[in-house]
Image (tube, rainbow, N blue to C red):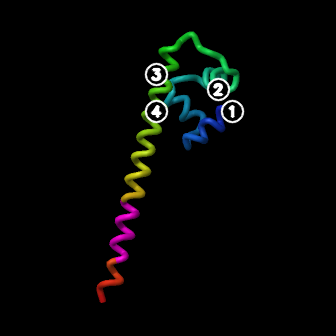
């Protein structure tokens, strides 16, 4: 998987992925494409933690938006009962 494909799975650009992880394009490429195992495990752990936080926040935002849409549709259903 390329870095671009990986970023797309998070609905990000490669530049945004670099910002979130704190890794350079080359660093991301080495890890994701080359299978390079970094000796800087703390930096890698921080990148994973940042991605997990990003994924959780994106999920929460999507759920809140879906919940608002659902409740809006329920209110529209009330129009069938009011003449």
Our reading of the magenta stretch's main secondary structure is helix
> Between marks 3 and 4, how big is the CA–CA gap?
10 Å
Check whether the beta carbons of the residues at disc 3 and disc 1 lie within 8 A of each other: no
2 or 1: tag closer to the N-terminus: 1
Position above or below: 54 against 48: below
Which of marks 4 and 1 precedes in the sequence?
Answer: 1
Alpha carbon distance from label 4 to label 2: 16 Å
Mark 1 residue crowding within 10 angstroms, few (<14) / some (14–19) / many (20+): few
User: Which range of residues does the magenta coloring cover?
Assistant: 68-77
> Which residue occupies 69% across, 26% down?
33
Q: Position of residue 65 (x, y in %)?
A: 40, 55
Please determine whether, in this image, residue 36 is positioned above or below residue 61.
Answer: above
Name the residue at the left extreme.
82
Position of residue 69 relative to residue 60, above or below, is below
Which of marks 1 and 3 precedes in the sequence?
A: 1
Gap between marks 2 and 1, in whole Å? 7 Å
Q: Quadrant of residue 3?
A: top right
Q: Position of residue 4 (x, y in %)?
A: 65, 36
Circle 2/circle 1 CB separation < 8 Å: yes
Q: Which mark is residue 52?
A: 4
* Residue in the picture at 34% in, 81% down: 79
Label 3 or label 4, whichever comes before in sequence order: 3
For image coordinates 41% across by 52% down, the residue present is: 63
Residue designated by label 3: 46
Q: Are marks 1 and 4 in contact (CB under 8 Å)?
A: no
Q: How many numbered tags mark residues here?
A: 4
Residue 28 vertical position relative to residue 66 in the rendered view, above or below: above
Report the residue at 58% width, 23% height from top.
24
Q: CA distance from mark 3 to mark 1?
A: 21 Å
Residue 2 is tagged as 1
Give the residue pinned by disc 2.
Answer: 32
């Amino acid at each position: 998987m390329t870095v671009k494909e990986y970023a797309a799975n998070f609905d990000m650009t490669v530049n945004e992925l670099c910002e979130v992880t704190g890794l350079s394009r080359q660093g991301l490429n080495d890890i994701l494409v080359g299978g390079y195992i970094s000796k800087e495990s703390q930096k890698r752990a921080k990148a994973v933690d940042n991605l997990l936080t990003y994924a959780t926040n994106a999920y929460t935002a999507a759920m809140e938006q879906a919940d608002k849409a659902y409740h809006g549709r329920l209110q529209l259903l009330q129009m069938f009962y009011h003449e």
